Image: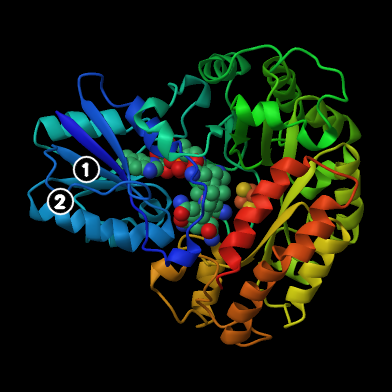
Amino acid sequence: MKILLISPERERKKEEAFLFRLGFLNLPYVAAVTPPDVEVKIVDEAVEKIDFDEKADLVGLTAQTPAAPRAYRIAGEFRRRGIPVVMGGFHASMLPEEALRHVDGVVIGEAEEVWPQLIEDLRSGQMKRMYRGNEFINPSALPLPRRELLHPAFYFPLKLLETTRGCPHQCDFCGVSTFFGFRYRNRSLGEIDRELATLFDKGPVMPPLPKKVLSLFSRDLPYFLKKRLLYIIDSNVAGNKRFTSGLLSLLREYDLRWYGHAPVSIGFDQKLLAGFSQSGCIAVNIGFESFSVKNLKAMGKGFNQPAHYAEAVKRIHDHGIGIMGTFMVGLDDDDPGVFQRIFDFCVDSQMDWALTFIMAPYPGTESFLRLEREGRIFCRDWEKYDSLNAVYHPLRMSVEELEKGTRWAWKKVFSLPSIYKRILKRPWIHPLFYLVMNLQFYHLTKKW
Ligand code: B12
Ligand code: SF4
């Protein structure tokens, strides 16, 4: 038996394509729970063409909302050739009835419990339309994702790692807690160590050299050259302090450069920041979202306090850690001045990298239900749910102002004068890494 697992790519305009492509973990995790006698191939449409005539017994599609229409078109091609298609991931889990109009079966939620059963049913000709696990899986029992099925030549050499699933919060624009549960479920440190050992050698990246040999500017270079780069994709790497402290000790043993997501409040936890810094943390990805307390309260993210943003950024920087900030616009308290406020904050605080997203009300989230009730959603083309297009009527500006303002913010943040002020002026914080990151987006946005 042969299964094709496909990650569809929505057709992007050339000027929206990124230079660096990251690998992913979802399909490698699905592959890992596929019975060993089944041949599995992963196809990433972002980097390779799909051969619709390839012989297979089953096609498994994944898709976040913006890629769902493309996934449905791919499903149509395979089904026309008589190959059954199933779909999993966030979009199909939130809208299974919609997905079932295009595919033969849907896996709702995590794949690990139900995927082997689905294959068993397919073998006996009794595949059902819907599969849903009885409970959230114990992440310590996860097999290692089959990364070897992704061709390394296609991707930026940054390894992805998942150490927890779930989140206890419920921000109205986010489906993570509904999907993965309202608490952090962490893997055991032993399992994480076992996985890290398949990705990196333990011990120092190179013998210690006199400081002069590697200036502060190029100190990260050996990590790039030796590909000791890690992205921890968890919703919050600092969610469970005891677990995080163990994880940081483990990361220290590997001598890496890593980054992950954390809340603003991490800026006020000196002990944790010191641990992050000593373990090679190069960046924390922080969802600042808004400077309006009203917006933050309305979205269920009242734990973010804008009055403390600047101080938090400073304290994180003082530990030599950079910040990848994300901001959300188009919220009910946003007037057209919001874009300038974001840009000014990024430059004034020397934010190392920052993206401004139009709030996208993804199906299955509170924000979708609310805007739907209020009759404000005017676009149901899921491909446009990419945070650069507006899909609902904002309250305090027009749709055009929102879309233009967002692109203006990207262009300004990644303009050369802004990159100079944020990255190249001292104090330097991993300048090589952030120069590369920023220039990629300068290159992307200069065509807009
Ligand atoms: C890391 C991450 C990213 C990284 C991606 C890195 C990478 N290449 O993987 C970056 C920062 C680039 C990113 C970008 C985006 N992301 Co993102 N991202 C995440 C994050 C934090 C983790 C994703 C992950 O890998 N999880 C671990 C894997 C194992 O879980 P999983 O993907 O859900 O897969 C499991 C199940 O869904 C299921 N499954 C999945 N696929 C399939 C397929 C089959 C056949 C089966 C049977 C089962 C199955 O089984 C898997 C194992 O249990 C999630 C939030 C979260 N905590 O999950 C958001 C999340 C997935 N992202 C989201 C969004 C919206 C985006 C963007 C569209 C944002 C934007 N506006 O540009 C882009 C799209 C990128 C793209 N692919 O084109 C949303 C998706 C919502 C939705 N309805 O689609 C999420 C849920 C965040 C949120 N706040 O709601 N993202
Ligand atoms: S946005 Fe972050 S903190 Fe809020 S529910 Fe989603 S994962 Fe949790």
On the rendered structure, is 357 left or right of 68?
A: right
Q: Secondary structure at mark 1?
A: strand
Q: Is 147 drawn above or below residue 378 in the view shown?
A: above
**Residue under circle 2?**
78
Which image quadrant for residue 246?
A: top right
Q: Residues within 10 Å of mark 2 (few under 14, many from 20)?
A: many
Q: Is 376 drawn above or below residue 318 in the view shown?
A: below
Name the quadrant of the N terminus. Answer: top left
Q: Residue at x 66, y 86 (%)?
A: 397
**Residue 84, percent from left and from top:** 15, 46
**Residue 372, percent from left and from top:** 49, 76
Q: Secondary structure at mark 2?
A: helix
Regarding residue 109, the answer to whether it shows in the image is no
**CB atoms at circles 2 and 1 under 8 Å apart?**
yes
Q: Which of the two residues, 86 or 278, is positioned nearer the viewer here?
A: 278
**Residue 257, percent from left and from top:** 69, 30
Q: Is 214 drawn above or below residue 9 in the view shown?
A: above
Kind of residue sitting beneath label 2: Phe
Q: Residue at x 56, y 73 (%)?
A: 448
Which image quadrant for residue 291?
A: bottom right
**Residue 211, percent from left and from top:** 87, 23
Q: Which of the two residues, 416 or 75, is positioned nearer the viewer here?
A: 416
**Residue under circle 1?**
59
Q: Residues within 10 Å of mark 1 (few under 14, many from 20)?
A: many
Q: Earlier in the sequence, mark 2 or mark 1?
A: 1
Q: Residue at x 53, y 34 (%)?
A: 157
Q: CA distance from mark 2 to mark 1?
A: 8 Å
Q: Residue furthest front?
A: 213
As drawn, the label of residue 185 is none
On the rendered structure, is 338 left or right of 425?
A: left
